[in-house]
Image (cartoon, helix red, strand yellow):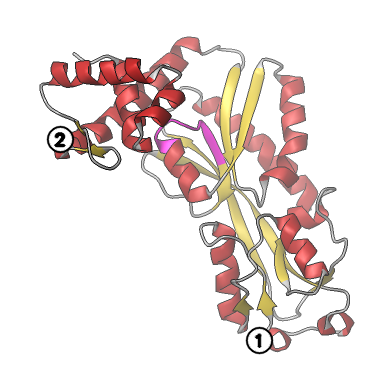
Amino acid sequence: MPTVRQLEYFVAVADLRHFGKAADACHVSQPTLSHQLKTLEQRIGAQLIERGGAGVQLTPVGRDIAERARRVIVEVRDIRAIARRSQDSLAGIVRFGVTPTLGPYLMPGIVAALHREQPDLRLYIREGIPANQALDLGLGRLDMLLGPLPIAGESLELEPLFRERMAIVVSPQHRLASYPVVTRADLAGECFLSMDPRHHYHHMVETICAELGGVILRDYEGTSLDSIRQMVGSGIGIAVLPELYIRSEVGGDAMVRRIDPVDWAASRSIAAAWRRNAAYADAYRAVAKKIQNAARAILE
């Protein structure tokens, strides 16, 4: 029978398509990884990897086994977590995924409060694309996820937390900044700044532009909300910014002016997610509740 470690080596090669990178990810030498993969193939009685040629390719049976191996690894990690579980508190490192349009402006205070209450808890916070992080959550690479709905993934438990209003901001020199009243019609034809199309934020701005008759500036995509705010302040375009960002110390409304169209409003729904039947599901739910309370206190 194959060992769990051999399956981990195989999944690393399947995901990274490179023996050297897989060995680094597994913290072993490449000869060790290659030897264990050959042993795995001998034990299974089938070739899993096509060797030679350009890049690393899986055989058809290798692709099939890789999918099952990922599920086995997730289950084994959950078993290990159950074995380490404490009845009284959550301890150890929790791998926490969060969208960059939310985490930097909400999580610092929450992390500090959690550490005061549970000093043995460590949050390893990783920002990323929500869709990619939902996949990592399902595969056991993350323990918990905070991001905008929808969050798609198999066997995930979702906990809706709060709705966050979105605000339109312009440069202080923009024509709309001097309007005593702004309407939807005034925004038609305006150029909106956004982020990489892989972000949920981009799709939200795209929907808003379609609704208002605006246009996304695809040649000037921001890498963060800070970069978008700075580009708005310099007059490149206008933007839609989340309420938590505008109210945060690191964000705010410096360099820009908020406008509130009388006949328009938009918001996004934020939720937490973790694997269904995860060993620490109750603890993740408690963390989600703290996030919910903190966000509502700021927004209200």
Residue at x 63% of width, y 74% of height: 217
User: Which residue sits furthest bottom?
Assistant: 185
Give above or below for 15 relative to 177.
Answer: above
Q: Name the quadrant containing residue 60.
A: top left
Closer to the camera in the image, 171 or 150 = 171
Task: Give coordinates of residue 112: x percent, y percent.
Answer: 77, 29
Q: Nearer the viewer, mark 2 or mark 1?
A: 2
Task: Give coordinates of residue 194: x percent, y percent.
Answer: 63, 66
Disc on the earlier residue, 2 or 1: 2
Q: Amino acid at mark 1?
A: Gly
- Which element is circle 2 on? helix
Q: Residues within 10 Å of mark 1 (few under 14, many from 20)?
A: few
Residue 117 visible in the displayed image: yes
Q: Is residue 61 left or right of residue 70?
A: left
Task: Give coordinates of residue 16: x percent, y percent.
Answer: 38, 36
In the picture of the structure, the residue carrying the numbered disc 2 is: 61
In the picture of the structure, the residue carrying the numbered disc 1 is: 189
Q: Is residue 295 left or right of residue 15?
A: right
- Which element is circle 1 on? loop
Alpha-carbon distance for marks 2 and 1?
A: 53 Å
Q: Where does the N terminus fall, quadrant-wise? A: top left
Residue at x 68% of width, y 57% of height: 164
Give above or below for 134 relative to 266.
Answer: above
User: Which residue sits furthest front?
Assistant: 53
Q: Amino acid at mark 2?
A: Val
Residue at x 74% of width, y 85% of height: 183
Closer to the camera in the image, 154 or 71 = 71
The boundaries of the magenta stretch are: 137-145
Q: Residues within 10 Å of mark 2 (few under 14, many from 20)?
A: few
Q: Name the quadrant containing residue 177.
A: bottom right
Q: Name the quadrant containing residue 50.
A: top left
